[in-house]
Image (cartoon, grey):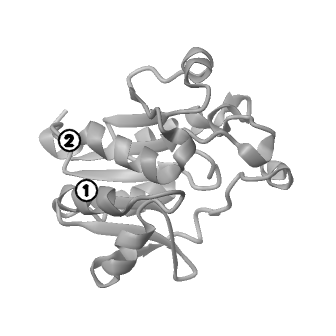
Amino acid sequence: MTDDEDQVAGLLLAAGGGRRLGGRPKALLEHRGHPLVEHAVAALRAAGCTRVHVVLGARAADVRDRADLAGCVLVDNPDWERGMGSSLRTGLDSLTGTAARAALVCLVDQPGIGAEAMTRVRAGYRDETSLVSAAYAGVRGHPVLLGAAHWAGVAATATGDRGARAYLREHEAEIALVECADVAQPYDIDTEADLVHLE
């Protein structure tokens, strides 16, 4: 693996407890015969991320037992119930000190976003100051590429379920938007009604 290949790490946030899904952890929801967490990891790998960190929270032991996450760095977030912001902070912290110069951040509950969209956003990486986001009909969404120069700032503002939203709003002028509506659908699996998206 070259240094260049390892500069963009995949960061998958997969800690959610599925509160509106009867407490079923999102990572273990089945889609096409496999847990959602496996689909997301496979997409990140297909997009060229050789290093993938997966942040676990709700029923982390079950996720480790039931999902094939071989080769991933599994990171436990003991504060996962505080929301996505804590998982993003935990994940970025786990990348500090690695060869990664940017994190391609994906959410486990968005199976409509696959390798094509991830590849497009990853291709926007230039250096550790990069900020790149997928857009859907011009509206910013996931995945998001955060250069390492932004990690401390993101971590300082990531609270509740907002993740990097506040930081990205402050730095909107620096974000390179990459249109992905032709290759991905950015729905979330949040409620029972959303389960229609799973096969």
Q: Nearer the viewer, residue 182 or 199?
A: 199
**Which residue is rendered at x = 25% and y = 56% of the image?**
151
Relative to residue 43, is residue 135 depicted above or below? below
**Which residue is rendered at x = 15% and y = 38% of the image?**
97
Residue 107 % position (x, y):
53, 50
Q: Amino acid at mark 1?
A: Trp
Q: Are marks 2 and 1 in contact (CB under 8 Å)?
A: yes
Q: Earlier in the sequence, mark 2 or mark 1?
A: 2
User: Disc 2 designates what residue?
Assistant: 96
Q: Is residue 43 visible?
A: no
Question: Would you say 27 lies left or right of 192 here?
Answer: left
User: Disc 1 designates what residue?
Assistant: 151
Q: Nearer the viewer, residue 28 or 153?
A: 153
Residue 49 % position (x, y):
34, 42
**Which residue is rendered at x = 72% and y = 53% of the image?**
190
Element under label 2?
A: loop
